[in-house]
Amino acid sequence: MALAQLNNPTCSKTQLHSSQLSFLSRTLPKQYHCTFAPLHRTQHGRITCSVAPNQVKAPAVQSQDPKSKPDCYGVFCLTYDLKAEEETKSWKKLINIAVSGAAGMISNHLLFKLASGEVFGPNQPIALKLLGSERSFQALEGVAMELEDSLFPLLREVVISIDPYEVFQDAEWALLIGAKPRGPGVERAALLDINGQIFAEQGKALNAVASRNVKVIVVGNPCNTNALICLKNAPNIPAKNFHALTRLDENRAKCQLALKAGVFYDKVSNMTIWGNHSTTQVPDFLNARIDGLPVKEVIKDQKWLEEEFTEKVQKRGGVLIQKWGRSSAASTSVSIVDAIRSLITPTPEGDWFSTGVYTAGNPYGIAEDIVFSMPCRSKANGDYELVKDVIFDDYLRQKLAKTEAELLAEKKCVAHLTGEGIAVCDLPGDTMLPGEM
């Protein structure tokens, strides 16, 4: 985000929003002093500060003063005494949830699920910290107004800002939804670079100001590699805490198996999505079960499983776009809720769920140091463990090798964003995301 135009050592002042002032105060060199006048939230100012190009230095990542508090919104600026309420009500300790891309369609569904208590429970007060862009800031105010008007008793604070260092302050959950969609004529390598820069900056902000045990779910595509970039830029946060969202793919796979078997989808369990959130993803019918039985004992059409089922799951997003005229939003928000719940509630005995996680120490022989969707179980503490009792055959191994190769190629393409040298982009031919045409 470019907020300053740098030429000569002179400075002209104009009015800026408080979050822009905070961002500039960290990024401008200390020897240049400017005076800014804050303005009303819905306006946007611009500053022109002049510095010789050879005097510009990369800003150091630094933590926000814990005593300073970003602006809250409307009724959420009123004070309340949570400790006093704890004496009469079974309120839990307030948790901070940061959401990027908060003015988008996915967030428009998700935020109200979070605020209602549907996700974290009916006795869990929350604070929502919403990150937008300069262009979306007015829409972000509209989102805050709707949250305000919904009278959610569990929603105790709403902060809106264009500064990730404000939004991620003390965050215990970070749901990173905002990313640039792939437009016509945009090469995959270019998309990796454009969105990778966003997630590199957000990783640095999380590293500087978020809770040391923050749980991060990356939704913005390409989500696996964006999650890798983010965690590499946040070395003070456990790499295990970063997830790439593949739960929607799991839900789609369960739906297709249920339809084919003629059962309701609550009968489908142990469904794994392996690998990348792209058309190389591997919906695993070998380990999945229907009403407790292996899928291959219920659906005996091997050709359908290997071809039609797999392709339907991989390309479901694209078909939805053709029908609906836009990418999935409501079902994506539901899958984010499912992903969070899977981490904060115990996994049912014998079952598991899919999420894209860091591969260090994995028991499957998957390449180290990438983010790869794998089967996991949770004990309800926000943590997880990889499932060991899975089986493989030649078909599954072959498919895993293809999606692994794609992720390794993406990793090389973003080496400049992960601190691993010069980027070399030699991407395989099939590198589309579900939904890309």
Image (cartoon, helix red, strand yellow):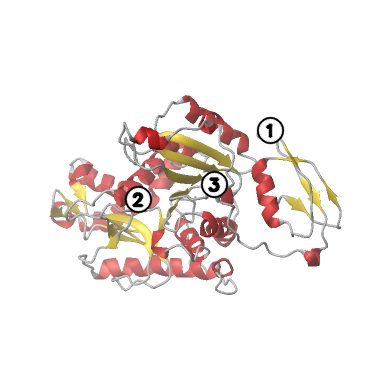
Spatial CA distance of label 2 from label 3 is: 25 Å
User: What x and y, as percent, mark residue 181?
Assistant: 54, 49
Instruction: Identify the residue at horizontal 52%, vertical 39% (top origin).
Output: 104
Q: Residue at x 49, y 59 (%)?
A: 226
Closest to the camera, between mark 2 and mark 3, is 3
- Residue occupying the point 33% across, 53% down: 382
Q: Quadrant of residue 92?
A: top left
Looking at the rendered structure, the kind of residue marked 3 is Val
Q: Which residue is mark 2?
A: 247
In this view, the residue in front, 51 or 36, is 36
Question: Could you tell me how far apart the alpha carbons at marks 3 and 1 are, in whole angstroms?
Answer: 19 Å
Could you tell me which residue is drawn at 41 percent across and 36 percent down? 82
Q: Which residue is more in the foreground, 286 or 82?
A: 82
Task: Using the rendered image of the protein, determine whether residue 113 is visible from the camera's viewpoint.
Answer: no
Which residue carries the number 3 mark?
167
Residue 190 coordinates in the image, percent (x, y): 59, 60
Q: Please say if 413 is above or below 177.
A: below
Residue 169 in view here: yes
Q: Residues within 10 Å of mark 2 (few under 14, many from 20)?
A: many
Horizontally, residue 238 falls left or right of residue 56, namely left
Q: Would you name the residue on which mark 1 appears?
A: 40
Looking at the image, is 33 positioned above or below residue 157? below
User: Mark 1 Cα within 10 Å, few/some/many (few <14, many 20+)?
Assistant: few
Dot 3, how many residues are within 10 Å of its Cα: few (below 14), some (14-19), or many (20+)? many
| Observer-nearest of 170 and 19 | 170
Of the residues shown, which amino acid type is indicated by label 2?
Answer: Arg
The mark nearer the N terminus, 3 or 1, is 1
